[in-house]
Image (cartoon, rainbow, N blue to C red):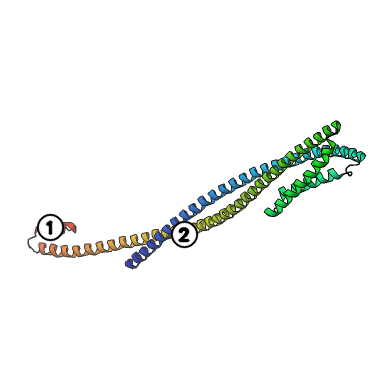
Amino acid sequence: MLNDLVDKRKTILAESEQHKNRRNELNALASKCARERNELNNQTRQYVEEAQKHKELRDGSNKDVSDLKDQRNVLNEKANVLFEELEEYKKEHGTIKKGQVKDIQRQIEFLEFKQQTEAMSADKERELVEKIKQMKGQVREQEAELEQNKEIRTKLQEARDLRKEASDLHIKVTESAELAQTHHDLMVDCYRKADKSREEADAKHRAFVEAQEAADAEHKSFIECQKELRDYDKVISGMRTKTKKVKTVKENKTVRMEAEKIFNSFKSGEKLTTDDLLLLQRSKLI
């Protein structure tokens, strides 16, 4: 009976160690998942902050585009007014049809914008550039007729200067638009990375919860094993104490019987040895 209890206690002790080791492994895994989750959450915040910066820069560039377009349009409008006056003059002199310079100039602006904004093959772009060059040559030829008149020459120069300023502003419009697109693309990329790291963080959090719950279950089993061990220890200790008492009683009974035999012999006149005297004292017969 006692040996069976001791064997069972060994089994429970082994189970207890297994639960403790598994609990510690799961707690370590939970800590690792929590640490990686926190790192990913920090990374997500950094991506979002970076995306916000690019958004602000994009919005600023878009505002620059709007402001520059307004300025460009004002300059073009002023230039158009002057060209209208010049065309009226040409109409009066009958050398060039009304609106011809203005129409050609508008075509040039359209073609230049097309060149700057549309993707095309090298041959197609060379063809477009040549066409713009020819049209500008036509404008210069027609405007050369006007330069004979000082007042007209002054207006023509002013119109050209306005058109040049508008063209310069258009270049800035294009640059700002490209910069806005660059920041927009970077913003989108940062948000995409933020979404990805957020998903990874959520997965790490789920793994953390699973490991923590499993560790708690192992700890609960470990505590139950410890309780069983204490119960076994009480029972085994009690049985050993009882066995020891029974053994002592049996030994005392044997000693008593032996002492009585020696005492009876002593009363009959036999001599006692030192060991006999010690045994009689131990049994409390003398």
Density class for disc 2 (Cα within 10 Å; few <14, some 14-19, many ≥20) is many
Left or right of residue 251, residue 130 in this image: right
**Three-letter residue code for mark 2:** Glu
Left or right of residue 269, residue 59 in this image: right
At which x and y percent is residue 160?
79, 37
Q: Nearer the viewer, residue 36 or 55?
A: 55
At which x and y percent is residue 7?
34, 66
Return the mark for residue 218: 2
Q: Earlier in the sequence, mark 1 or mark 2?
A: 2
C-alpha gap between disc 1 and disc 2: 64 Å
Return the mark for residue 250: none
Q: Nearer the viewer, residue 2 or 61?
A: 61
Examine the image and state in which quarter residue 265 appears. bottom left
Q: Nearer the viewer, residue 61 or 13?
A: 61
Image depth: mark 1 or mark 2 in front? 2
Residue that mark 1 sits on: 277
At which x and y percent is residue 249?
25, 62
The C terminus sits in image quarter:
bottom left
Q: How many marks?
A: 2
Asked if residue 181 can be seen in this view, the reply is yes
Q: Please give the name of the residue rendered at 44% of the width and 55% of the height, measured from the top-left corner.
A: 24
Q: Callout 1: helix, strand or loop?
A: helix
The N terminus sits in image quarter:
bottom left
Q: Please give the name of the residue rendered at 74% of the width and 42% of the height, measured from the top-left corner.
A: 170
**Three-letter residue code for mark 1:** Leu
Examine the image and state in which quarter residue 106 appears. top right
